[in-house]
Image (spheres, rainbow, N blue to C red):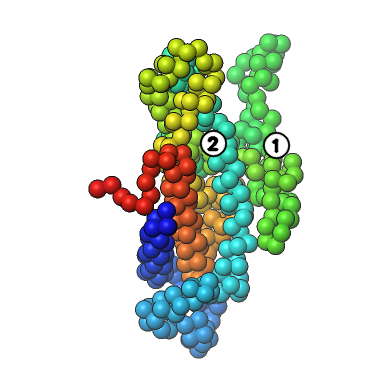
Amino acid sequence: MIMFLIRRLCQALAVMFVISVIGFAIQGGLGDPVQQMLGPTASEAESATLRHSLGLDQPLWAQYLHFAGNAVRLNFGNSYFFHEPALSVIARYLPATLELVAASALLTLVLSVPIGVFCAIRPRSWPSKALMGLSALGISVPVFLSAMVLIQLFSIGVQVTLFPADTQWGDWLNQLLSIEGGMPAYGRGNPVHVWGVWYTNFASLQGLVYLLLPALSLAFVMLPLFVRLIHAEMLDVLESDYVKYAKARGLRPSRIYFLHALKNTLLPVVTLGGVQIGTLVAYTLLTETVFQWPGAGLMFLDAIERADMPLIVAYLMVIGLMFVVTNTLVDLVYRLLNPRVILTRSVA
């Protein structure tokens, strides 16, 4: 275990180095931050003075070495726009993004497990076929499209007029199929202050209402994949000998399905979950833009428009670290779920 953690630490350092180099390599294509800060009417003398104070007149390798030395001390420089440490800016916006990812992951878990198990237990029933068809369709639907559909349905509302409104049955059907809407689809509302820069939507009913649509939209990224994976793995497990033996012993079906069979499908699910958690952080860029959710993803896009390089590089470093930590935790969960997984040595 110790050797595994040491290797993971070395890999994390290598990943952080590569991410920092990539961040500096792309900075030239994002515009001139001096012009963004001073505007097009600034004189050459003012631009030169600001460029020198920011260290932008030095060679790129010198700027990187200066950044690397400060990064070791968790100093990523000051944001050009906010005029405060970039890490402090990210710390202010990151809780909203993590809360959105946590809510979507919870929705995915709550919905995918019963749907996947049901489709595996009753594979020939019409609800199972319909759910599997929807999951196949859901894989190809982009997150911004599902977000706009949710806004139309539950925020703006849909008024159905398919049937004759001058008849009682037609008016009843139109009202039955219509959706009133009214749910919030902009911003975060008034989150409750917890501690420091941490504000949460989980502490109030209003906050949960504001969180529901963005979290559900983001959950559609993982939900179809998890449903299909649990369904496929569950089908294989149900055909195994030990499940047939458990049925022959007369064990309750719920105990067979949710204790013995489901437990043995968790390893590939954990694998996919560890990868998809990082993917969710990436997809928050689109979700936060559509819903104007004030998180780190929306802040990152604004930083790109302003050519705020300290904030951009700091964001990439923080997200890269989150990926490394998530993958490490996934490998550790492997060991808990399956003691036969050996972490201290690799299989050739």
Image location (x, y in percent) of residue 175: 68, 20
Residue 6 picture quarter:
bottom left
Mark 2, residue position: 108
Residue drawn at x 74%, y 56% as measured from the top left:
193
Image location (x, y in percent) of residue 301: 51, 59
Residue drawn at x 48%, y 73% as measured from the top left:
72
Instruction: Determine the secondary structure under disc 2.
Output: helix
Name the amino acid type tagged 2.
Thr
Viewer-side residue, 249 vs 309:
249
Viewer-side residue, 70 vs 141:
70
The circle drawn on residue 182 is 1
Residue 138 appearing in the image: no
Q: Within 10 Å of the Cα at label 1, are there few (<14), some (14-19), or many (20+) other Cα atoms?
A: few
Instruction: Determine the secondary structure under disc 1.
Output: loop
Residue 174 picture quarter:
top right
Which sits earlier in the primary sequence, circle 1 or circle 2? 2
Image location (x, y in percent) of residue 112: 52, 31
Residue 342 appearing in the image: yes
Residue drawn at x 60%, y 66% as measured from the top left:
89
Residue 95 to residue 142: above or below: below
Q: Within 10 Å of the Cα at label 2, are there few (<14), some (14-19), or many (20+) other Cα atoms?
A: many
Viewer-side residue, 328 vs 76:
328
Q: How many numbered marks are there?
A: 2
Name the amino acid type tagged 1.
Gly
Image location (x, y in percent) of residue 38: 55, 78
Q: Nearer the viewer, mark 1 or mark 2?
A: 2
